[in-house]
């Protein structure tokens, strides 16, 4: 018997033998629910025998037989009643455990989110993708016609989603594409660092998403709650089933504010801020302007995060303001980073260290923010130890810039598209899904070990566009496009100067400019000009319109 725990009350198993019933009683189960109709297979004692054996060992038993693929609402109610009425813990079984898990899932539809239910099933080893639409429909069978199908469905209309749609259309207009995204607004997030330093207004980083959808692309304003890749479908939050021939997954990542105790309650007040939210970046600038000395903390969570340089960019620009207005000498500035070093690419550490020294910043590596009390102006960090987690240390602050832990979105992690890490599992060169031939992924949501940046998405979009269109038969040739892991991090070390880190897989430096123009290992005024004046129009006018500046993909021969 292999019982998989679904909840404190319920565990699930494949077919139990009479000996398994005894073992279940010894393991502490108080009841058994049988979801297999009698006589379904030769391996199966009839319910009466199971019930008699259960009774012999002090357990109760109930028969809620269901036929695979034909679970009625009455079945779900009967299962739910049994689960509630029988003494817990309960073990439920059918042939493999899938029907029992499905009954549990349907009985929780409406009270738990779809990703939460699918994630519970997945953790127990059951793929509930095929039932996702019904779960999204509150457990009731989905009878209405689904959403209109599309040749290409793109999940997410962020930097990556819009860019890849535009790149596909730049190669052929003969396409039927839909972008699914529930948001009203689209954000140029790289601008938030400059909002936090009073250089951009928040409004400069925001546009209506509808205004950016490429001409000819259908916008579906809804959130995706689940993937059903075996049926070429995604499930929308209103339980509509949206079918596709080709799927591109680009929903970005989840900022997990709730993972730090007390953080959500105090964000935006008590001196607690973050450039990682549109509405808070201007609060960073307010705090920096009003800072009169004291302790300023800057945190960085475990990798991977989007724009790994952004936590320290906020710090350097704040310090630069305080140096200008004479406050820096009265400030204690500390960078508390869960990771082991200042920056992941060693070549860029020396120029950054010069600024750390210039601003007198204390570096505390292996310090992971776990709790914050805004009104008490106190934060707690778990220190890394050689053999795992170490002691918890406390810091007081006058202001704190927090970067939250980051994960793949829940509905991605709960799906069969994700790798063990939770990110969409892709081949890191072609960006094609490792299992499903008609699925690609790009941007922050996918598993390749590149730096999660808009600059990376700019290079990935043409790669996905070419490889997908070639697979579709709309591009000829024997070559396939290759993504080399390019990512870029313009490190704003002071107002007017940037260390322009550009690197590919393995931390290999890949500067776009000759060193006489921009030396990537030195702070550069031209790089600042690029960030402030050129990159925003390049983003809005080129990348999101399929013009692909500095983004021509490399190619290699297709394997035969
Ligand atoms: P996003 O742009 O985040 O878009 C994701 C989209 O998916 C959103 O529109 C969202 O509404 C949608 N979505 C989410 N859930 C669902 C769902 N269930 N169904 C359908 N749609 C969904 N990058 C740089 O290159 N340079 C920088 O200097 C830089 N600085 C940064 C500074 C900060 C403070 C931050 C926060 C980011 C920075 N970045 C930078 C990173 C960059 O912004 C991201 O890497 C980039 O936006 C990723 O694009 P994406 O399309 O994958 O995700």
Image (cartoon, grey):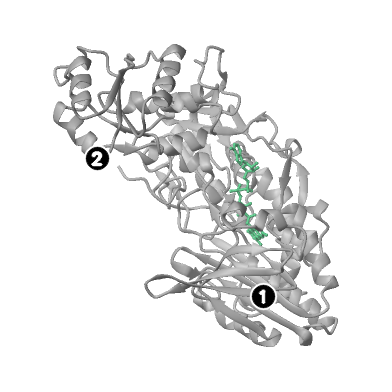
Image location of residue 178, percent across then percent down: 61, 30
Looking at the image, which is closer to me, 185 or 268? Answer: 268
- Residue underneath mark 1: 517
Q: CA distance from mark 1 to mark 2?
A: 71 Å
Q: Nearer the viewer, residue 276 or 481?
A: 276
What residue is disc 2 on?
27
- x then y, percent, for residue 191: 73, 58
* Quadrant placement of the N terminus: top left
Please state which of residues 554 and 141 is positioned toward the viewer in this rendering. Answer: 141
Question: x, y (%) of residue 356?
Answer: 64, 82
Secondary structure of residue under mark 2: loop
Residue in the picture at 56% in, 78% down: 364
* Helix, strand or loop under label 1: loop
Q: Residue at x 48, y 54 (%)?
A: 483
Quick check: 478 above or below 283?
A: above
Kindly identify which numbered label has been placed on residue 275: none
Q: Is residue 388 left or right of residue 334?
A: left
**Is residue 181 or residue 83 the one in the foreground?**
83
Quick one: quadrant of the C terminus?
top left
**Residue at x-position 77% and y-position 53%:** 279
């Amino acid at each position: 018997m292999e019982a998989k725990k679904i909840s404190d009350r319920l565990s699930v198993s494949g077919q139990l033998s009479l000996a398994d019933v005894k073992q279940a009683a010894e393991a502490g189960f108080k009841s058994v629910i049988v979801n297999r109709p009698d006589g379904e297979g030769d391996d199966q004692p009839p319910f009466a025998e199971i019930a008699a054996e259960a009774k012999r060992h002090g357990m109760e038993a109930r028969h809620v037989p269901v036929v695979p693929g034909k679970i009625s609402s009455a079945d779900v109610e009967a299962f739910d009643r049994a689960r509630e009425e029988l003494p817990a813990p309960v073990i439920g079984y059918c042939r493999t455990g899938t029907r029992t898990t499905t009954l549990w899932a349907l009985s929780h539809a409406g009270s738990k989110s779809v990703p939460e239910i699918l994630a519970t099933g997945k953790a127990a080893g059951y793929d509930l993708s095929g039932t996702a639409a019904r779960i999204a429909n509150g457990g009731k069978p989905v009878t209405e016609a689904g959403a209109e199908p599309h040749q290409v469905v793109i999940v997410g209309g962020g930097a990556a989603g819009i860019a890849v749609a535009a790149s596909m259309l730049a190669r052929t207009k003969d396409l039927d594409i839909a972008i699914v995204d529930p948001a009203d607004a689209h954000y140029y997030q790289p601008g938030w660092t400059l909002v936090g330093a009073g250089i951009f207004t928040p409004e400069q980083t925001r546009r209506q998403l509808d205004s950016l959808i490429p001409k000819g692309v259908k916008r579906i304003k809804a959130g995706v709650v689940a993937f059903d890749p075996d049926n070429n479908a995604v499930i929308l939050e209103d339980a509509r089933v949206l079918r596709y021939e080709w799927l591109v997954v680009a929903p970005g990542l989840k900022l997990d504010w709730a993972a730090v105790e007390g953080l959500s309650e105090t964000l935006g007040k008590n001196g607690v801020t973050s450039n990682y939210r549109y509405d808070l970046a201007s609060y960073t600038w307010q705090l920096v302007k009003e800072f009169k000395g004291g302790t300023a903390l800057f945190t960085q969570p475990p990798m991977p995060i989007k724009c790994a340089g952004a936590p320290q960019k906020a710090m350097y620009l704040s310090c630069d303001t305080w140096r200008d207005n004479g406050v820096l000498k009265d400030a204690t500035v500390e960078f508390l980073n869960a990771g082991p070093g200042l920056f992941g690419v060693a070549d860029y550490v020396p120029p950054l260290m010069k600024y750390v020294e210039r601003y007198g910043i204390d570096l505390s590596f292996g310090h992971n923010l776990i709790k914050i009390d805004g009104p008490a102006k106190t934060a707690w960090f778990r220190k890394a130890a050689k053999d795992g987690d170490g002691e918890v240390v406390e810091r007081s602050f006058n202001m704190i810039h927090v970067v939250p832990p980051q994960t793949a979105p829940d509905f991605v992690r709960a799906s069969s598209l994700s790798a063990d890490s939770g990110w969409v599992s892709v081949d890191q060169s072609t960006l094609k899904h490792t299992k499903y031939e008609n699925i690609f992924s790009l941007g922050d949501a996918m598993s390749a070990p590149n730096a999660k940046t808009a600059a990376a998405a700019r290079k990935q979009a043409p790669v996905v566009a070419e490889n997908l269109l070639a697979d579709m038969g709309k591009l000829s040739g024997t070559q396939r496009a290759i993504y080399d892991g390019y990512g870029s991090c313009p490190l704003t070390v002071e107002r007017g100067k940037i260390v322009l880190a550009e690197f590919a897989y393995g931390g290999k430096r890949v500067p776009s400019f000759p060193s006489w123009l921009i030396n990537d290992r030195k702070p550069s005024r031209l790089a600042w000009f690029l960030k402030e004046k050129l990159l925003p129009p390049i983003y809005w006018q080129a990348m999101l319109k399929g013009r692909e500046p500095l983004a021509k993909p490399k190619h290699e021969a297709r394997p035969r």
